Image: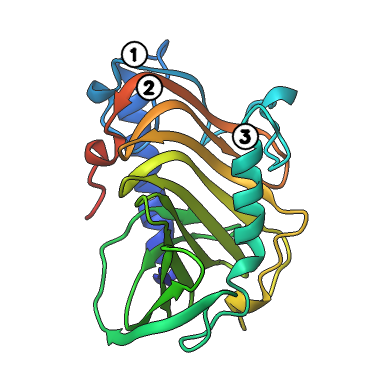
Amino acid sequence: MKRLQSVPYLNFITLGLGFLFLIGSLFGANSPERLFIPFLDPASQSNVTVTVSSVFAKEAPCPPEYTNSLSNTNLFTTEEQMWIKEVLVKYKNVTTNSGPPGTILVNLYKTNFIAPPLYWVKTNEYWMIHRTNELWVANFQYTNSGAREEISFGKSVAAKFTNKSNDGYAASIAWVGSGSLLTFSERKHGSASGVLVRIEDLHSQGTDWDYRRADFSGGHLQEYMQMTNGMLLGKWFMWNVSSGGLMLEAESKVPYDWNNHRINLSP
């Protein structure tokens, strides 16, 4: 589960300008003919083909086959569509004492920690950082199978579903600006394998945000990634949710450990 904490507006302006200069020098000056995935070490991307990289520029038109919709069968199998549709509504009514239908509470505890930023989220006005602090964690057991759920509660909600074969998914609903962001990551044998998607709620809640009021009907994909053992293997897309334009299109034919090649942008 991730809780957003804002940084003063002027600091974001300064930081944002720093990003632009840094990305420009890293991804444009030395090899203008080659595109790279922003925020990742260019030297690590030798086996990654980047077709679109316009995070800091006007996005590219999106081909119809890559439309950022959950109904797009070029991106999702029928099973993946059903799973994500279930997740879109599954966690609206869960509490620390009441889990998803068919479960019983087996354990509940409180934790307090601060996690480092996982990724940056751009709102219409400024950048924000996902952080986590003070959570209630509830463990639920399904009564008709060996499946189980670990659900964390705070400002946001995060869940990890695991069946008896140690397969399942991780999901979270987090506050982004005045709206909501649902992240879904398929897991196999305990690691991220399959699809990772982020879907943005286009219905603003204002400053009084509550994950239980998140409404993803009509929402669009913000990000899509094909993974194996936590690494990119296949397509990676990012879209401008409002326009549907492509901001990133990349593909790796071999497993790419993108998470360990992020550029440290800390001051």
Residue lying farthest front? Answer: 144
Front-most of residues 88 and 37: 88
The residue carrying mark 3 is 77
Q: Quadrant of the C terminus?
A: bottom left
Taking the spot 63% from the left edge, 55% from the top edge, the residue there is 200
Instruction: Judge whether 261 appears above or below 147 on screen.
Output: above
Instruction: Judge whether 69 appears above or below 172 on screen.
Output: above
Taking the spot 24% from the left edge, 24% from the top edge, the residue there is 44
Cα distance, mark 3 to mark 1? 37 Å
The quadrant holding residue 148 is: bottom left
| Disc 2 residue crowd, few under 14, some 14–19, many 20+, Cα 10 Å | some
Say what secondary structure mark 1 lies in. loop
Front-most of residues 122 and 229: 229
Question: Please, which colouring scheme is shown?
Answer: rainbow
Q: Mark 3 or mark 1: which is in front?
A: 3
Cα distance, mark 3 to mark 2? 37 Å
**Callouts 1 and 2 close, C-beta under 8 Å:** yes
The residue carrying mark 1 is 31
Q: Mark 3 or mark 2: which is in front?
A: 3
Say what secondary structure mark 3 lies in. loop
The answer to whether residue 39 shows anywhere in this view is yes
Q: Which mark is residue 28?
A: 2
What amino acid type should be assigned to the residue bearing mark 3? Thr
Front-most of residues 33 and 76: 76
